[in-house]
Every structure is written in structure tokens, then in C-alpha cells.
Amino acid sequence: MKIVFQKKKPFFLAYIALALLAVAGCHNQKTMNELEAISQMADEHPDSALAMLKACEDKVPRWQRGDRMCYELVKLKAQNKADVLFTSDSIAKEVADYYSFHGTSNERMLAYYLLGRVYSDMGEAPQALQAFYDAIESADTLSADCDYSVLIPVYGQMSLIYGKQNLPRDEIWALRHYIDYIRKTDTEKEYIIAKQQLMTPYYQLGEKDSVLAIINETYNSLKQLGEDREAADALVASVFIYIERGQLAEARRVIDIFERESGLFDAQGNIETGRESYYYIRGAYKLAVGQVNAAEKDFRRAINSCFSPDVYKGLMAIYRRKSNMDSVMHYGFLYEQALDTIHKQMQIDAIHQMSSMYNYSRSQKLAEQEARNARNARIWSVGILFTVVLGFALTYKLYLSYKKKKQEEIDALSKSLSDARKEYQTVQDELLTLNNRDYEKLIADKEKKEKELRQTIERLEDFIGLPKAKNSLDTFSESTIVKIFRQKQAFKTESFLPRESHWRALVMQFAKEMPDMHRLLVEEKKLSPLELHVCILVLLGFDDITIVHLTGSISQTITKAKARANMKLFGVKGAHGLKRELFRASRPL
């Protein structure tokens, strides 16, 4: 029996080690219940929740790891609810790393969302977007207890980042998800107000009809709910579009509704403090209908509002009509100064954004290097452990041979050893067979065979006299818009980066020439704009470096986009093989 116990001893020790690791990550139920109660309190009273967390701060270092991570998660949540400005990502990263392997899908989603909020406060947009994408992938929307109160702000925060980066189509993509989940979980009023946020990106795209449709739909829907004041407030945004189109009667109608129904004006007709920017809107209308003096009065009342550059421009127009060139020059100088201030801030933001992208790329490389070092360390550890175990086994065998005790047990062990060797030889033979099998060569042979068959079919079609159908991908590749992109690839155009109009033309041509693929990517699998652009460029044969430059992204972002597209379209993890699968899907049956 002693020999049998010694054989099982390594497995017994391994079991003990695993048990200790399991205990290190477990929870104290009483502590978890208390933290859950504090977490619920943080939703409505974050300051009180933070005070309660502060009271037990001294005990936290003595808690088990699972409880400590739960404490930090609840603390980050309460700080976020209390609008605390995050300045360090160390705790949030540790919490996200822990919940990537522990806890529920809701906890994992919350951890990644809070990590994204930390990066947003720190001005690190690329890392924030990646964390928000990880939060989305963690969400289990098919589950009845999916926490939409976290998923909704994930998309909301993404829309804000895309808006700041002047990416209106990506902003629309994020807002549509945000609106869909608001509709599922919130009131009709909140759903209407959420849809109103689509005005800004559509206005950036120059789609004024869509903007007017959103404004009018918001106004009518709020009126039906009896929210007359908020309806009037939503309607006033359409005044500029009506002025721009020369529909001055419509602009007058909107102004009358706003001043009559918004409830923002006192008995003397003055708007409440903080809303003085409205005077610029009304002044623009009065200038358009020729009421120059009234327009000047309104512009002066709005001069300290958020529209100061436009106000100066309006005053310039007024004094130009009055032929007062001194005042034109004065307000022209103020207008130029205001624009310079805005331009400098945009430059600062652009430089910071470029710096963030560089730092993100560098941190990704460092993380990859650390991962490689960790893998190498594990390989060395396993090798050393294997050597020790093998040495122990050989020593143990020599010991048994030398003592020659308990012949029956030795015979049994010899038979077991023989069986193990046979099984080992079988495994070795199987491994040798697998190692000798060149999978890349098999794939190459199949592709060569496919090419030969296609050439044979074409020769037979020529011989019979059948007309050859041109491949839709070939037709698409020869289109004018694709040639423009190839010129940009070869630096043969004035601007290397495609404009938004180029991307729209490329997608429209793709939909025309390859409608089935367009329907698969856009309607069925609902790829994001960036994922769609990447897939089209991959189909056209552009390499990864060119795709990075054409999209104005970084290599890690493109790799992530390809991986997400590969999973959505073909259920394949990782970016590898996307090109092959796209070509297969695009070929006619």
C-alpha cells in the first residue's frame, strides 16, 4: 500500500494547490451582501455609498481577493455616479482583469464600462473605445437579467467619443444601439429625447431633411404626451435650417411657438438666465427679414453666449448694411479672435488625440512583450517541473529494481509501464503523422485545383461559345471610386486620406455591384461603419498597412475590427482568415 500512496502523492499535492487557489478567489457571503446593498445605494445616493465604503476601508486589505475586487468595483461605480474625475487607471485595470475571468456577465460588463470611463476622463480615447467594445462583448442580451442600465451608457459614451472625433457615421451607429435599448427599458418620453440626439451627426453629414424630420417628430411626439414646454424647446433648433432655405414663414412660426409655449420667458419677454443664446437665433431671423435694428439688439443681448463667433459675424453683417466700416472692422477683429481661440483648442485636442493613439499603440506593444515573457516563463517552469518529475520517476524505478521487493507489485508495475510505453508510442506516432502533414500545402493544393477547374470551365465556355459572366468583384474593382482609392494608396492624389464622400461612394458602388455581400455585411450581420470599410478594402486586396492609413486608424484598431467582423460574419475568432472567408462568400454559387 505504501507504493500506491507514493504514486498518488503528486496528484494529492496538486489537488491541495488548486484548492488553495480556489479559496484565494472566493467570497465571504456576508461581505458580498453588504457590498451588494451599497452598490444598489450608489445608483441613487452615490455620496452616501462612498461614505459607507470609506468606513470599512481599513478592513479591505485583510479580505479575500474576490471580496477586495468586489469592493473596488462598487467603489468605482459610486465614484462614477458621483462624477469623480478619474486620474489613474491602475485600480480599474486590475478590476477589469479580475472580472474577465470571474463573476457574472453583468459584473464583467460593468468592470469594462468603468475602465472605459476612467480612460475617457484621462483623455485616452482609443483605450476607452476598446474598453467599451469589451463591455459590449461581455453583455448577455439574451439573458433576462441583462443589466441595461450599464449597457445603455456604454453606447452613450461611445457616441460622445465618436462625436468629439468628428466621426458622424460611427456616432449614429452607437446612438442607434443606445436608442434601441432606451426603448426597451425606459419611458416613452426618454425614448423620444434619446432619438433627438441623432440631429447633431446628421447635421454634420449635411442631411438637413433628416434633421428636420427628427425635430418635427420629436415635437409632435412630445405634444402627444402633453409635454408642451419640452416640445417647443425641441422645435426651436429648426429655425436656422428654415432661414438657410429661405422659408422665413416657417421660421417665424417656430419662433412664435417657442416664445408662447416654452415657459422660458417672463412678462417682459426676457428669456431665463442661461438661455441667452436664443437671442442669436431670433436675431438671425430678424436680420433675414430686414429688421436690422431689432436684429442688432438681439445680437448684443446674446454677445456673451456660447455663439459669440457667430454673434460677431452677425454684427459685422448688420454694420455692413449700415455702411459703418469702423464697426465692421471692429467686429471682424473680434470674430477672427474668437475663431483663432476655437482653432487653437481644436489643434490642442488633435495633438492630444494623436498622443493618445501613440501611447495606446506603445502600451499595446509593451503588453504583448509582457505576455510573451510570461509565456516563456511558463514554458521554462513546465520544463523544469517535467525534468524534476522525470528524475523522480527514474530514481523511483531504480529504487524498485534495486530492492526487488514485492515481486507481484513489481510485475504489476512492469505491465503498467509496458502499457504506458505502448500508449506513448502510439501518441508519438500520431504526433509524427500530424507534424508531417503540411496543412498549408493541402490548402495550396486545393486552391490550385480550384484554379485549374475554373480555367477548364472558362476554356469550355469559350469552345462552346457561351458568353462569360464577369465576376461582380472584378466589376467593382474596376469602378471609378475604387481607382480613386488605389490612387490614394499610391500617393497619386492631392490628399491621401479619403473624404467622407469617398467612403459613401465606395459603399454605394459596393452595394450596386455586390448586393448580396452588401446585404450580408450591413443588413444581416450589422457591421459597424469601420468594420464595413475594412471588409470592403480587404476584398479589394488592400494590405493591412494601407488600410490603417486609408482609415486614419492604428494597426491594433484595424486588427480588432477584422476580428470582430470575422466573428460576426463567420463565427471565427481572431482576424486571421477573414480575407479567405470573404472571397469564398463573394463567389457566385
Image: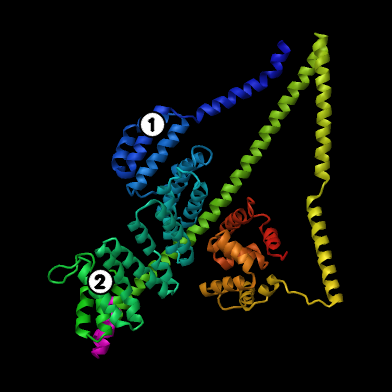
From which residue to which does the magenta span run? 311-328
* Image side of residue 18 versus residue 235, left or right: right
Q: What residue type is labelled 1?
A: Asn
Q: Which amino acid does label 2 sit on?
A: Tyr
Residue drawn at x 86%, y 72% is 460
Q: Is residue 581 above or below residue 401?
A: below
Residue drawn at x 33%, y 84% is 246
Residue drawn at x 33%, y 64% is 221
* Image side of residue 549 versus residue 342, left or right: right
Residue 268 part of the magenta-drawn span: no
Residue 394: x and y in percent read 78, 21
Q: Is residue 435 above or below residue 341?
A: above
The residue at which mark 2 appears reads as 278
* Image side of residue 71 versus residue 134, left or right: left
Residue 333: x and y in percent read 30, 80
Mark number displayed over residue 33: 1
Q: Measure the alpha-carbon separation of dots 1 and 2.
A: 51 Å
Residue 26: x and y in percent read 49, 29
Extreme-bottom residue of the structure: 323
